[in-house]
Image (cartoon, rainbow, N blue to C red):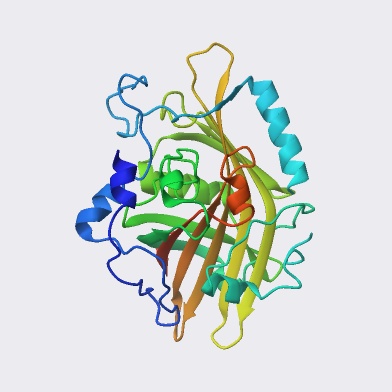
C-alpha cells in the first residue's frame, strides 16, 4: 500500500531546519523529491472492493471513504461520547508542565507527551508582533516513530493521526509539500489571538482546494470547541469535524523573542456511512507545537516550525506500549510573510 511504501523509505540524512536557530534533530526520515510523492499520499486507502468511491467532476481527487474506522455509532451516541471524553481530558495554561522542562526545551528534544486530566484551558495569547494576516509556505520535512510500539504495527494502523486525509485538521493532507495558505491573528488587549475559523478554512483550502467547507463554528467565549461542517459529498473522509482543545501552553525565548505554542487536541471526524442513521467516526488525539521566530530587522517575516505528535487511543492494542508518548511525529518548516492583500 502507499503508506507502507512511504514509511519504509531509507534514512537520507538528518533534517536541517529552515532557520539557523532551529537545530537538526536525529530520528527523522528526510524526504527526497522522488519519495515525497509517496509520502504525499500518506493515508491508508481501501481497495475498490472494500470501499465505495464517489466521483464528482470538479471536486478534489481525494474521494475515498473514511478508512477502516472500527467505531460506528449513532450520531447522538457519538457526540455524547465525545462530550464526556472532552470533559475528562480537558490544569490551566502552562500548569500541566509547571514542574517539567520549559516548552522550548521539550520541542527541541522532540519530547511531546499527551496532556491528560486537565481543566479547560484559556484562549491562547500570542505576542503582539504576530497580529495581522500572514501568507504561509509550509514544507514537509519528514517523520519519525519515537515510541516503543513496533514500526510495523504503526504503519498498519489506519487510525493513527495523519494517516488519513483530514484526520489532522491543521494538516489535512500530510506529506503534500509545499503547501500555501494564510494565517490570521487578531489584535486583542495588547496581544494577538488566533482567528480559528479563518485559519481552518484557509489551511484546508490550501491543502485540498477551496470549496470543501460549508462553515466553521467557533466562539471565542468557548475557545475549546470548534465545529467544521463540510459541503455535502465534498469529501468522503469527513462530513463534520468536532475539535476539542484539552490543553494549551506557551513559552518565549528571551534571546531572540522566539515564541512557542503547543495545543493538545481531540478531533472527532464524522464521515458518511452505508448504514442509515449511523455515523462513521474516527477519534484522534494529537498535539501541535509551533515555533515562531521573528526575523531581526524584518517585522514582516517569521520563520518557524510545526511539529505534530500523534497518540494512540486507549482502545488500541498497542496503547500500553505508548501511553502518553507519541507514536508518530511529523515535522514541517514554515515561512510566513505579512500579507499585502489583507
Q: Residue furthest top?
A: 276
Q: Residue at x 72, y 53 (%)?
A: 116
Residue 222 against residue 194 in the figure, above or below: above
Relative to 211, does residue 92 appear above or below in the rendering?
below
Camera-side residue: 122 or 154?
154
Quadrant where the C terminus is found in the figure? bottom left
Q: Please name whichever residue, 260 or 129, is drawn nearer the observer in this view of the structure.
A: 260
Residue 59, position as x, y percentages in the image: 32, 30
Question: On the rendered structure, is 129 left or right of 20?
Answer: right
In the rendered image, which quarter contains the N terminus?
top left
Residue 254 is situated, as x and y percent measured from the top left of the image, at 61, 86
Report whether 137 appears left or right of 198: left
- Relative depth, front residue between 133 and 26: 26
Position of residue 19 measured from the top left corner of the image (x, y, whole percent): 40, 78
Query: Can I make out residue 278 in this image?
Result: yes
Which image quadrant for residue 216?
A: top right
Amino acid at each position: 500500500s502507499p503508506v507502507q511504501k512511504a514509511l519504509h523509505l531509507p534514512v537520507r540524512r538528518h533534517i536541517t531546519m529552515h532557520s539557523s536557530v532551529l537545530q537538526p534533530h536525529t530520528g527523522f526520515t528526510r524526504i527526497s523529491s522522488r519519495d515525497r510523492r509517496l509520502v504525499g499520499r500518506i493515508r491508508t486507502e481501501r481497495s475498490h472492493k472494500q470501499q465505495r468511491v464517489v466521483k464528482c467532476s470538479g471536486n478534489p481527487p481525494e474521494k475515498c471513504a473514511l478508512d477502516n474506522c472500527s467505531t460506528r455509532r449513532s450520531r447522538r451516541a457519538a457526540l455524547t461520547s465525545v462530550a464526556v471524553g472532552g470533559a475528562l481530558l480537558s490544569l490551566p495554561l502552562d500548569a500541566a508542565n509547571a514542574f517539567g522542562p520549559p516548552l522550548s526545551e521539550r520541542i527541541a528534544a522532540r519530547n511531546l507527551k499527551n496532556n491528560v486530566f486537565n481543566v479547560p484551558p484559556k484562549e491562547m495569547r500570542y505576542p503582539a508582533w504576530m497580529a495581522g494576516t500572514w501568507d504561509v509556505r509550509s514544507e514537509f520535512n519528514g517523520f519519525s516513530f519515537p515510541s516503543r510500539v513496533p514500526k510495523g504495527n504503526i504503519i498498519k494502523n489506519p487510525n493513527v493521526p495523519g494517516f488519513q486525509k483530514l484526520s489532522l485538521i491543521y494538516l489535512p493532507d500530510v506529506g503534500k509539500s509545499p503547501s500555501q495558505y494564510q494565517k490570521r491573528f487578531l489584535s486583542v488587549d495588547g496581544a494577538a489571538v488566533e482567528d480559528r475559523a479563518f485559519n481552518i478554512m484557509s489551511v484546508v483550502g490550501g491543502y485540498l482546494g477551496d470549496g470543501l467547507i460549508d462553515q466553521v463554528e467557533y466562539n471565542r467565549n468557548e475557545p475549546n470547541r470548534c465545529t467544521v461542517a463540510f459541503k455535502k459529498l465534498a469529501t468522503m473522509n469527513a462530513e463534520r469535524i468536532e475539535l476539542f482543545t484539552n490543553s494549551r501552553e506557551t513559552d518565549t525565548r528571551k534571546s531572540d523573542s522566539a515564541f512557542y505554542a503547543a495545543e493538545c487536541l481531540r478531533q472527532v471526524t464524522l464521515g458518511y456511512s452505508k448504514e442509515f442513521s449511523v455515523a462513521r467516526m474516527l477519534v484522534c488525539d494529537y498535539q501541535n507545537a509551533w515555533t515562531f521566530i521573528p526575523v531581526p530587522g524584518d517585522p514582516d517575516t517569521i520563520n518557524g516550525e510545526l511539529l505534530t505528535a500523534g497518540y494512540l487511543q486507549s482502545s488500541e492494542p498497542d496503547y500500553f506500549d505508548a501511553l502518553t508518548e507519541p507514536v508518530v511525529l511529523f515535522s514541517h518548516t514554515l515561512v510566513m510573510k505579512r500579507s499585502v492583500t489583507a
